[in-house]
Image (cartoon, grey):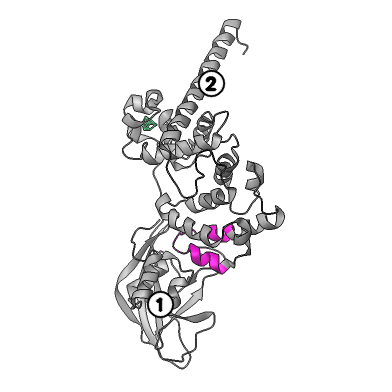
Amino acid sequence: MTLSGADRRRKEGRGAETASRSRDRAATLIGWYDRHRRDLPWRAPPGARPDPYRVWLSEIMLQQTTVRTVAPYFEKFVARWRDVAALAAADREDVLREWAGLGYYSRARNLHACAGVVARDHGGVFPDDVAGLRALPGIGPYTAAAIAAIAFDRAVMPVDGNIERVVARLFAVDDELPRAKSRIQALAATLVPAARAGDAAQALMDLGATICAPKSPACSRCPLARDCAACARGDAETFPRKAAKKTGALRRGAAFVLLRADGRLLLRARPERGLLAGMSEVPTSAWSPDVDKRRARRAAPTLSGARLRWRLVPGEVRHVFTHFPLALDVYLAHAPRGARAPKGARWVALADVHAEALPTVIRKVIAHAGVIGTRAEGAGLARHGVASTRVR
Ligand code: SF4
């Protein structure tokens, strides 16, 4: 269909108006950011050039994890490994140990692998565009866009959960997630300014985190309120629209805490692939929706030359992974001094357990069994989150 001259002029006029509104919104955002930006440990001071190593490290840690949880881990990592070359040279087990408690452990393995590639193949300098960053281990489309924008001021808009919410409300996107993602991405791109793309992205992240909150957006304090479609309709908290979530079936299993008479705990390494790959754990049964208690109990480890009396610890440990909830029965037994560990397992002194790369669910199991007695041992576990019932 060909447009008449008048139609074409009308269309061009609308296009110019849209571009001008986009520029105004971006300018408003940047002005707000200059006055209200959050002070975060990985952020460069105003006007300073961001350090790509700190931007990358923070973006990997922030995947599926809150700012408050990440902050102490970030400080610990940059104090111990001050640049990408230092992290590349670190022992992978040390990196996993420092990561313990942050969850999603494949991130830690990819972090170490990525540092190795940057140090070895790129002379310790991160690629400065989306395509180059995407080629690195553990960097997906969102993280590549975030690093490219924040560290290198590339004109892209990363869309995280906060930005997704703000944009869905600003333009009242009625489509449900995840179908709406590409539309939201396209609309978010209209908020990229000609300069300071990284600050525009961080402005939207901050706006979503501090004002455009999921349940109760504070529209009266929002710099974009006059231009926000959802705010005008009065139903901002209903955006973004979401399809009903399917949660996985409850999986069950048993965990076995075996304590030797000289204060050592039996640990083993999980398989190199799959859930919590490569992490340490006390022996456990399979985790499955159809595991019954008797079958799970049969997975208890045995020792040659010693008969173990397994006692069920009252209660159970609950944990929620992203795709399924888990309930574990915990059994406790004592082994005689000098007992040899079964194949694939090892004895670890209780005082050293806090330094192991144990996932949160296993730290909960150990705490539930009550074998961590001294203050130092307990503090070590609590530091890694065993005292918390909050689970990501
Ligand atoms: S006006 Fe309200 S709904 Fe719209 S972006 Fe601002 S806080 Fe969010």
Q: Residue at x 48, y 31 (%)?
A: 30
- Residue 126, position as x, y percentages in the image: 64, 49
| Residue 164 x, y percent position in the rendering | 45, 37
With respect to residue 100, does 340 lie above or below?
A: below
Q: Amino acid at mark 2?
A: Ala
Q: CA distance from mark 2 to mark 1?
A: 63 Å
Q: Which residue is mark 2?
A: 19
Q: Nearer the viewer, residue 243 or 349?
A: 349
Tell me which secondary structure the magenta stretch mostly adopts: helix
Report the span colored magenta: 93-111
Q: Secondary structure at mark 2?
A: helix
Reply above or below: 133 against 103.
above
Vertical relation: 346 (above or below) 216: below
Q: Quadrant of the N terminus?
A: top right
Work out whether residue 218 or residue 178 is closer to the camera in this orientation and state it.
218
Residue 39: x, y in percent? 43, 45
Q: Is residue 211 left or right of residue 357?
A: left
The residue carrying pointer 1 sits among few (fewer than 14), some (14 to 19) or many (20 or more) residues within 10 Å by Cα, namely many
